[in-house]
């Protein structure tokens, strides 16, 4: 009996000792201490605590790199150039890098940990991205699964953005088991109405941020936004344009149409909006107003599977088929696409197949 008790005590002692060694080694090994990050050849120098991803570390220092997936390593937009101190490229980064980027030391800031002094380069315009305190001013139902959220900016109280850009919203840890995350949403409002930012959001079943926005976020509540981010925007050319988007992909086009209306644009723009069924269509009234204000603009809603009870007399089928029905040569056009990666890839194929140069197809993938 004594032998058994002795063995149990001995094993427990060994286990406790091992646990202690683990804790100490974690503290010693994972404690990277204070690290220096030099940005853009000395334009800025930061002294930070090591141990966190570069993206988070920079955010804590109020330098906001785009991070459309909120740091999950799935969007590839948090790229920056690391000249020193990042170690070798990680398997999680390789799918997002071409050969040129690898050679230039481009890395995903959300995957690289700050473990020692680093030297990095980021596009200069990123220094201008700010954090905004805002409050939810109004919410409007657009369809059964889409809402428009209107945020009033409080501090700073204005955001200068270009139609087509997006913001990131911080979704707090609103229930047990959910950590704070941030997600990207295209700005769907008038760039001149810059005391407010409107977003058109589609509910993703069980999605962390959209569940919060639809079920928890209430009018008057404070939120945190950063931005504006992104290169998606109308080019300066005068070439006629094809817009393609379904669902919440409509958001940047609403902003672009405001911009065209203000500029008195005469540039031809044909917008093909795809929905699965009639209940996916929205903003018909606003689109009709844009058609009146911008005579060169035409809105073409297309329903993939209209039901007999819908009495739908408009275009039916896939949005890409509607484009093909209307155009046989798009070599002089530009394409603007927004929405799911699947829809964008299918649309690019069709537009390029109709002669549109690949480099004249601009898009923002919602992924
Ligand atoms: C540049 C950019 C702009 C964007 N603009 C908008 C916008 O204007 N309006 C808008 O509604 N969304 C937009 N998105 C998508 C948005 O950022 C979120 O990815 C989306 O709202 C889901 O977030 P979530 O936290 O609710 O879901 P998550 O918790 O991230 O995802 C839950 C599950 O749903 C899947 N999932 C993630 N996103 C989608 C999706 N879009 N459709 C179907 N399944 C999905 C995930 O793979 C996961 O399995 C944009 C994305 C990018 C990159
Ligand atoms: S934020 Fe780094 S890959 Fe999306």
Image (spheres, rainbow, N blue to C red):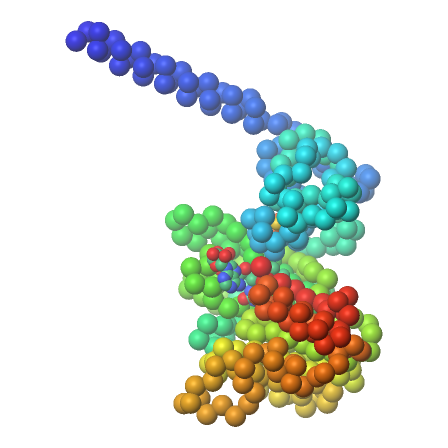
Q: Is residue 55 left or right of residue 98?
A: left
What is the quadrant of the C terminus in the image?
bottom right
Q: Percent x, y for residue 4?
A: 21, 11
Q: Percent x, y for residue 200?
A: 56, 70
Q: Is residue 363 above or below residue 6?
A: below
At horizontal 47% and vertical 23% (from top left) the residue drawn is: 23
**Quarter where residue 338 is shown:** bottom right
The answer to whether residue 188 is visible is no
Residue closest to the eye, 54 or 240: 240
Residue closest to the eye, 338 or 348: 348
Q: Percent x, y for residue 353?
A: 71, 73
**Quarter where residue 215 is shown:** bottom left
Q: Is residue 120 above or below residue 353?
A: above
Q: Is residue 314 above or below residue 192?
A: below
What is the quadrant of the N terminus in the image?
top left
At horizontal 52% and vertical 51% (from top left) the residue drawn is: 181
């Amino acid at each position: 009996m004594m032998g058994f008790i002795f063995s149990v005590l001995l094993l427990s002692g060994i286990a406790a000792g091992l646990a202690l060694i683990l804790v100490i080694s974690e503290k010693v090994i994972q404690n990277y201490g204070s690290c220096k990050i030099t940005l853009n050849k000395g334009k800025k120098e930061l002294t930070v605590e090591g141990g966190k991803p570069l993206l988070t570390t920079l955010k804590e220092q109020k330098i906001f790199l785009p991070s459309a997936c909120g740091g999950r390593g799935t969007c590839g937009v948090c790229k920056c150039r690391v000249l020193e101190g990042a170690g070798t490229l990680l398997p999680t980064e390789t799918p997002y890098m071409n050969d040129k980027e690898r050679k230039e030391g481009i890395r995903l800031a959300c995957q690289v940990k700050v473990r020692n002094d680093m030297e990095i380069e980021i596009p200069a315009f990123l220094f201008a991205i700010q954090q905004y305190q805002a409050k939810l001013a109004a919410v409007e139902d657009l369809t059964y699964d889409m809402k428009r959220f209107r945020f009033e900016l409080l501090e700073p109280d204005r955001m200068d953005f270009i139609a087509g850009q997006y913001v990131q919203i911080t979704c707090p840890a609103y229930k047990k088991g959910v950590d704070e995350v941030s997600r990207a949403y295209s700005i769907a409002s008038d760039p001149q109405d810059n005391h407010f930012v409107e977003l058109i959001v589609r509910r993703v079943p069980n999605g962390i941020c959209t569940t919060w926005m639809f079920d928890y976020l209430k009018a008057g509540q404070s939120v945190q936004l950063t931005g504006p981010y992104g290169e998606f925007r109308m080019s300066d050319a005068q070439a006629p344009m094809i817009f393609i988007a379904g669902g919440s992909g409509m958001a940047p086009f609403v902003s672009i149409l405001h911009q065209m209306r203000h500029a008195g644009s005469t540039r031809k723009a044909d917008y093909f909006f795809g929905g699965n069924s009639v209940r996916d269509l929205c903003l018909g009234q606003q689109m009709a107003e844009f058609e009146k204000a911008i005579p060169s603009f035409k809105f073409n809603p297309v329903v993939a599977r209209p039901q007999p009870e819908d009495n739908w007399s408009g275009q039916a089928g896939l949005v890409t088929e509607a484009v093909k029905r209307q155009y046989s040569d798009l070599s002089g056009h530009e394409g603007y696409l927004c929405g799911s990666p699947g829809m964008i890839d299918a649309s690019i194929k069709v537009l390029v197949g109709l002669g549109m140069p690949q480099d004249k197809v601009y898009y923002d993938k919602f992924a």
